Amino acid sequence: MNSKIYSMFLILLSFSIYSQNINLQESDKVFEPARVRQEGLTGFSDTPWMTPFSQIKDKFKTLATTNINNEKIEILQMERNKYILVKRNNIVYRYNFYKTPYEVVKIKNHNLPFDEFDKTDAVLYQVRVILPFIDAKLLEEKLQNAYGKKTKSTVDEKTLRGADIWDLDGGYIFLWYEPYNNKAFARRIDYISKEMSKRILEESNDYFDSKEKELLRDLIVK
């Protein structure tokens, strides 16, 4: 092998290993609240499921303007009653919110004015963690240390696509696999409220993608 090519190969290999280590150090912060074995999933970190949108928005606005434990927190984007996208220590979190559609609410409350309905907050039902590419097995190990053995897996050994699933009291965790150079990686973890997911599937078709719907329906009707 040409010496210049070999040197470049070593540099790229070293950078890849370095990046993987940095990514793992950053991802450790995702599991910080779960250092002790968790018995269920009543929310994400210190935020319970069904927390109102405005409460979480105010919390992150405060955290973004104060320096607590040398954490860098930035609100990247938000849409009222739909989502808040937050970057925290180089990891992106999408907090997703749900509100029963006006048409559904009116079935039981025929005289409810839209203005009054519009004033109410949507509530938290899901947190999506978006990571740099990390070896899926390393993330699976971290989740198992925090929440116990996974309940099931839909990962196809040939395509390396699918999800490891934790069915816990109060919620579900989906660790999504993606192939890269014939190896399983992951960069997305979904934490979902069990109670809210059942309610959403009954009331609306707009809040989960097709793969999530398939997994959730299978888990709920089992």
Image (tube, rainbow, N blue to C red):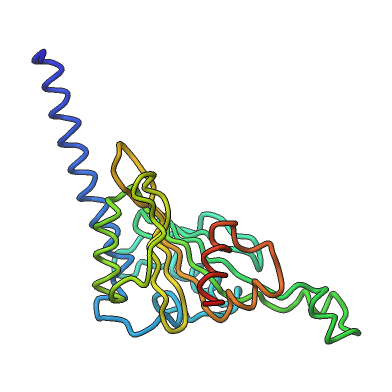
Q: Is residue 200 left or right of residue 15?
A: right
User: In the rendering, at what x and y percent does residue 113 appear?
Assistant: 88, 79
From the viewer's perspective, is residue 205 above or below residue 148? above
Q: Quadrant location of residue 57? A: bottom right
Q: Is residue 118 visible?
A: yes
In the displayed orientation, state which residue is furthest to the top. Answer: 2
From the viewer's perspective, is residue 184 above or below residue 163? above
Q: Quadrant location of residue 89? A: bottom left
The front one of 35 and 190 is 190
User: In the rendering, at what x and y percent does residue 97 appear?
Assistant: 60, 70
User: In the rendering, at what x and y percent does residue 213 appear?
Assistant: 58, 63
- For image coordinates 33% across by 63% down, the residue present is 71
Q: Is residue 65 visible?
A: no
Count of labels in the image: 0
The front one of 182 and 57 is 182
The front one of 190 and 113 is 190
User: In the rendering, at what x and y percent does residue 114 appear?
Assistant: 85, 75
- For image coordinates 34% across by 49% down, the residue present is 157
Q: Is residue 166 left or right of residue 21?
A: right
Q: Is residue 153 left or right of residue 207?
A: left
| Quadrant into which the N terminus falls | top left
- For image coordinates 53% across by 74% down, the residue present is 56
- For image coordinates 38% across by 83% down, the residue present is 40
From the viewer's perspective, is residue 95 above or below residue 112? above
